[in-house]
Image (spheres, grey):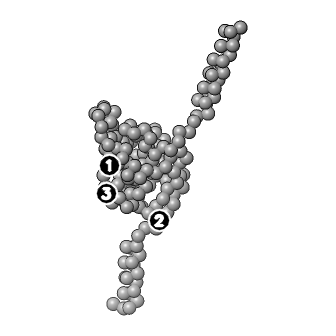
Amino acid sequence: MSLKSLFAAALLTALSSAPAQALHHSLNDWWLTTDSFGGLKQSEYDPTFYFAVSKSTTWNPADTYEIMPGYRWATTQEILDAFVPSVANSKLYNYNYYSQGGWAGYTWEGHRRYFFRASDSAATDHFLHAGQFSFYEGGTSSSTTNFAGLVLIETAAVPLPGALGLMLAGLGGLGLARRKRKS
């Protein structure tokens, strides 16, 4: 074999084993909102946690993701602290996402989706599984396939302007009714 062929083979081997390039994904690039939950399902165990569905089913542990306002990406420790099985409750035996929101088992839009990842899953390999019961604390796997999305925590409830307006109108109406009654 010539020196040129050896160099080409070595270069090809190095390129094929190089780690994937880290990317930052904007919200519109990664978040899949087409299921009946709008791609954001609230946990039935801890209502401050949410499962956000990814368009891609391949996870690159080095990637970062823009998170929608009012939420942040949960850490493994936050998941472990929150998802501690407690008193039996029938709603806790619902799955995180399996066969819900229009999914056919683990499949949505023709792709199987299992693993919802924490912000530090690159170091911990932690995940919450789409097919686990809602109280389960998850597990570990370094698999980069069957990526389902991210585990999020709600940081602040965003008030609905319509609800606020109705509440203020109702309070105003109560005040008017009291004034009329006193007259």
Residue lying at 35% horizontally and 52% vertically, measured from the top left: 127
Q: Quadrant of the N terminus?
A: bottom left
Sequence order check: which comes first, mark 2 or mark 3? 2
Place of residue 161 in the rendered image (x, y in percent of width and height, measured from the top left): 61, 33
Give residue 141's mark: 3
Gap between marks 1 and 2, in whole Å? 25 Å
- Label 3 crowd bin: few (<14), some (14–19), many (20+), radius 10 Å: few
Q: Is residue 179 left or right of residue 109?
A: right
Note whether residue 62 is visible. yes
Residue furthest out toward the bottom: 2
Q: Amino acid at mark 1?
A: Gly
Q: Position of residue 96 (x, y in %)?
A: 36, 42
Residue 166 location, quadrant: top right
Q: Viewed as shown, does residue 154 lie left or right of 76?
A: right
Q: Nearer the viewer, residue 72 or 2?
A: 72
Image location (x, y in percent) of residue 180: 69, 10
Viewer-proximal residue among 58 and 123: 123
The residue identified by callout 2 is: 22
Q: State if disc 3 and disc 2 touch (CB < 8 Å).
A: no
Which residue type carries mark 3?
Ser
Mark 3, secondary structure of its residue: loop
